[in-house]
Image (cartoon, rainbow, N blue to C red):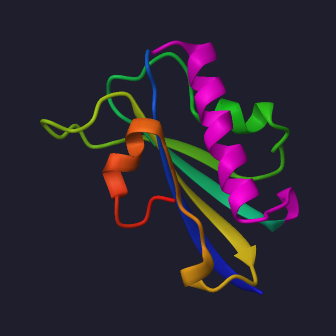
């Protein structure tokens, strides 16, 4: 079993707590499903949010999915001029038998433009 990292992102339509929880939960569910992961495979999640998001912590969505014993942390993304607004990113550390080339990174909706090279 190897330790691997999975990337993902989602752009929010608006800065509202319920909307953030819904979209981040959809992102996490897609990461888990596309990589055939169970909660026991999860080591930790690192979330970032662009500076224009203030309504909630992205990690609250993970807790809402029942991921209560997985270490989570949130940070603010760099405030780069011209960057896509209202984006939550995640870096998940996992244990898996998948090779790096077999990892499915998940970029939902408009966030797929962020990483056209790896978005699934």
In depth, the one of 79 and 86 nearer the eye is 86
Can you tell which quarter of the image residue 5 is in?
A: bottom right
Q: As displayed, is residue 87 above or below residue 116?
A: above
Verify whether residue 39 appears in magenta.
Answer: yes
Q: Main secondary structure of the magenta part?
A: helix
Q: Position of residue 57 (x, y in %)?
A: 57, 28
Who's the residue at 63% across and 15% down the image? 18
In which image quadrant can residue 99 be found? bottom right
Name the one closer to the observer, 36 or 61.
Answer: 36
Q: Relative to residue 27, is residue 44 depicted above or below?
A: below
Query: Could you tell me which residue is drawn at 67 percent across and 49 percent down?
Result: 30
Q: Extreme left residue here? A: 81
Please report the bounds of the magenta region as a residue range: 15-40
Check if residue 88 falls in the magenta segment: no
The residue located at (56%, 24%) in the rendering is 20
Quarter in which the N terminus is drawn: bottom right
Q: Quadrant of residue 94?
A: bottom right
User: Could you tell me residue 13's position as x and y percent?
Assistant: 43, 19
The residue at 80%/67% (across/down) is 41
Is 7 positioned to the left or the right of 37 in the image?
A: left
Q: Position of residue 83 (x, y in %)?
A: 21, 39
User: On screen, 109 above or below 113?
Assistant: above
Number of dots carrying numbers: 0
The answer to whether residue 43 is left or right of residue 10 is: right
Q: Position of residue 82 (x, y in %)?
A: 14, 36
């Amino acid at each position: 079993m190897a330790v691997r990292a999975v990337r993902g992102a989602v752009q929010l339509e608006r800065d509202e707590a319920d909307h953030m929880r819904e979209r981040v939960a959809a992102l996490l569910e897609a990461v888990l499903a596309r990589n055939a992961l169970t909660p026991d495979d999860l080591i930790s999640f690192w979330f970032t949010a662009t500076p224009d998001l203030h309504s909630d912590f992205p990690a609250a969505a993970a807790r809402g999915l029942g991921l209560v014993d997985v270490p989570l942390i949130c940070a603010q993304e760099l405030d780069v001029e011209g960057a896509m607004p209202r984006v939550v990113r995640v870096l998940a550390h996992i244990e898996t038998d998948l090779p790096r080339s077999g990892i499915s990174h998940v970029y939902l909706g408009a966030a797929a433009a962020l990483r056209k090279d790896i978005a699934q």
